[in-house]
Image: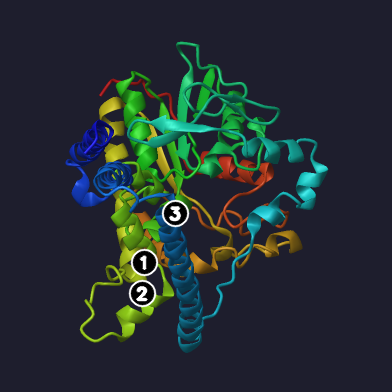
Amino acid sequence: MTTRRWLQIVVGLLVATVGVLAGLQGWRNMGWGSLSQLMLFLMGATIVFNAIWPGRFGLATLTRAYTTTAVLLLNTLLLFVLIETMIGVFVNVRDGYVRPRFVDVAEIRENLPYYQQVRWGQAHWAEIDTIPERYAPFTVWVSQAFEGETATVREDGTRLTPGADCDAPDAYTVFVFGGSTVWGFGAPDEGTIPAYIQRTLEEQRNDPVCVVNYGMFGYVATQGTIRLMLELQRGHMPDAVIFYDGINDVLATSQNQAAAGHQNMAPVARAFEPNTLSSALLTAWQRTNTYRLVVRWVPNAPSDAAGPTLPPTEQLAQDTADAYLLNYNVVANLADVYGFDYAFFWQPVLPLGDKTLTPDEAQFVNGIDTWLDLYAATYAEVEAAAPNYDNLHYSAGIFDEVEAFLWIDPFHVTPEGNAVVAQHMLDTITLTSTTRGEN
C-alpha cells in the first residue's frame, strides 16, 4: 500500500473520529447538530474505504448511487402525497367536514369608511404593522420604543398618554392595564382609553394628573398583574389602578386549551425545547391525514396517540374565570399594602352584546364563530361572580345603547368607543386622593 493511501486512511479516520466524538452528547436525539456530525462520520468512512478499495467509490459509482436514491425518494414522496390526498378526502367526507365560518377582519377593517374619512386612518394601519416588540422579563414581551404619526411608544414599552404630567412629584397617578384595547388598537395616541381618562381627570382635579397606558398587544390579566408588581418593585407607586380585560384571557385559553396561560405559547415554548430531527419528523407525521386514519382504524392503536383529551368548554370557561379572579385577589392585596384604589372591568365583545349594529359593524358578527361557545361560557361565569367582588365590574353591555358606529372588528372600537369606555369607568368608580404607602 502506498504512502498516499496510508495518508488517505489516516485523514479519513480523523474525520470520522471527529464526527463520532462531536456527536456523543446528542447522538441519541438525532438533532440537526447530530446530522452534521453524522455527515462528517460518513465522509471520513468514505475516504477510508476509497483508500483501501480504490475505484469502488469513484465518481461514477457515487453518481449512479445518487441517481438511484433520488429516483426512489421522489417516487416514494409522490406516492405518499397521492395516498395522503386520498385519505384526506375520505376522512373529511366521512366526518362531514364543514369549513368554519371566519371573517377576515384585518382585510375589512382597514377599508372601513371610518378610516377613509379620518385624516390619520391610513397612517395608523401602516404604523401598527411596523411597531416592533422585544423580550421582557416575566411578561414575555413589550413593545419597543417607537415614534410615528399616530402612535408613540416610550422606552419602557408604555404608549404615550398626551398631557400626562408624570414628572410632577404630586401628580395623581393612574395605571391602566389591559391588552390591545387599552393600548389603543385602531386609535391615535389621543384617542385611547387612558388618554380620555387623562383629559377627564384634568378637568376634575386641581393637581397634576399622570395616566400611564400599560396596555400591550395580546396581554392577559395575569401579565398585567405581573407588570403592576414589577412597577411596584421599581418604586413606581400609583394612586389608582384600572384593569380592562377579558377578550385576551378567553382567546389565550382557546389557543392553549388550558387556562392561566399567555397567548402564542407554542412559538415561545419552541425557544426552550430541543429542535431535534426526530421530534420534527414525529410532529410532521402526527399532522398527516394518514396518521389520523391509522389512529382511528388500526386495531390496538394507543388510545392517547392523537394527543390528550381536550377539556369541555364549561371547564375551560370556569378555569379562565378562576384565573382572572385570582388576579383580582392579588391586586386587592397589593392595594391594601401599598394604599391605592383599584378596579377591574370585564370588557365587551361584539357578538355577545345587544347593540343595534350598523351595516359596517354587522360584517363582524361571525368573526369569532370558532371561539363563540367559550366566550359565551366564560362571560357567563364572570357575570355570575362579579356581585361577589366589590371592585369587579361586568361591563359587557356598555355599548348596548349606543347607536353610532363603534366596532372595527369583534374586539376593538373606534376612539369614540374608547371615550365611552373611559367615561363608563369614571362613572362607575370613585378615584380618591389616596396617600400612597400609608398602609
Label 3–label 1 contact, CB within 8 A: no
Residue type at tag 3: Ala
- For label 1, the crowd category at 10 Å Cα-Cα, with few meaning under 14, some 14 to 19 and many 20 or more, is few
x%, y% of residue 348?
53, 55
Q: Is residue 417 above or below residue 410?
A: above
The alpha-carbon separation of the residues under discs 1 and 2 comes to 6 Å
Q: Taking 338 as reference, is 63 above or below it?
A: below
Q: Which residue is mark 3?
A: 60
Find the distance from the CA under tag 3 to the CA under tag 1: 36 Å
Find residue 328 and report its horizontal and vertical position in percent. Answer: 32, 44
Callout 1–callout 2 Cβ contact below 8 Å: yes
Q: Which residue is mark 1?
A: 285
Give the mark, 1 or 2, whose residue is nearer the N terminus. 1
**Residue pictured at 30% horizontal, 52% vertical:** 323
User: In the rendered structure, which disc, 3 or 1, sits on the residue that comes first in sequence?
Assistant: 3
Q: Is residue 132 visible?
A: yes
Badge 2 is on which residue?
Answer: 291
The figure's colour scheme reads rainbow
